[in-house]
Image (spheres, grey):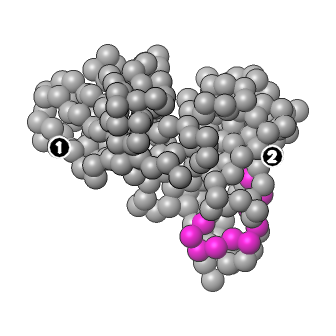
Amino acid sequence: EVQLVESGGVVVQPGGSLRLSCAASGFTFDDYAMHWVRQAPGKGLEWVSLISWDGGSTYYADSVKGRFTISRDNSKNSLYLQMNSLRAEDTALYYCAKDPSSGGTAPRFDYWGQGTLVTVSS
Amino acid sequence: SYELTQPLSVSVALGQTARITCGGNNIGSKNVHWYQQKPGQAPVLVIYRDSNRPSGIPERFSGSNSGNTATLTISRAQAGDEADYYCQVWDSSTVVVFGGGTKLTVL
């Protein structure tokens, strides 16, 4: 059974930093691209970032480019999101999601975690 | 950047057919995916590449895509189908684009 478990969400002040983690199990982690998708309270889904199976390719939404960094450790079956210079508008539930392809060249999400809540507030 | 437009809400009588649209410029040339999100839960993929159902998704869910509109069709709607539905495509400039979401109400 595929499982994705996010962690690391907390309340952080504007301008602060945070690292989210996603622990994957139930599939061969290093065969697949992975994503972060977020959802602000009461709002729709917003794609954040994509990383290819080997970490060689990464992509970001314009809203986070230059502030967030996606990475993965295939030896630990883990996905990460380093979030810097956080803003109030980054407040959201952050989901880790699996892509059914290795490169994420035609991305979609076949499995999702339950999310971890990030609140940016003073 | 590419944009997807969905109606905010759709209502359907119990047992009838619901159709949720997703509009985009020449969306028929793209692969459209649909997600169902029930309150307090993570999204679930219900249709991929326009009209394909993942395993475990009822045959009542179907999809089509042509011209400037993609459509998710839910036949014989059930109370358990009440949820928010999102369409999604890949775009070369934006990578991943989601529609704004449609709240389905089963009356």
Amino acid at circle 2: Ser
Badge 1 density bin: few <14, some 14–19, many ≥20, Cα 10 Å:
some
The part of the chain drawn in magenta is: A78-90
> Secondary structure under badge 1?
strand
Residue A85 falls within the magenta-colored stretch: yes
Residue drawn 44% across the image and 54% down it: A44
- Counting from the top left corner in percent of width and height, residue A63 is at 62, 62
Q: Which residue is mark 2?
A: A71
- Counting from the top left corner in percent of width and height, residue A37 is at 59, 48
Amino acid at circle 1: Ser
Residue drawn 27% across the image and 38% down it: B20
- Counting from the top left corner in percent of width and height, residue A28 is at 75, 22
Q: Which residue is mark 1?
A: B11
Chain ID of residue with mark 2: A
Residue drawn 13% across the image and 41% down it: B107
Badge 2 density bin: few <14, some 14–19, many ≥20, Cα 10 Å:
many
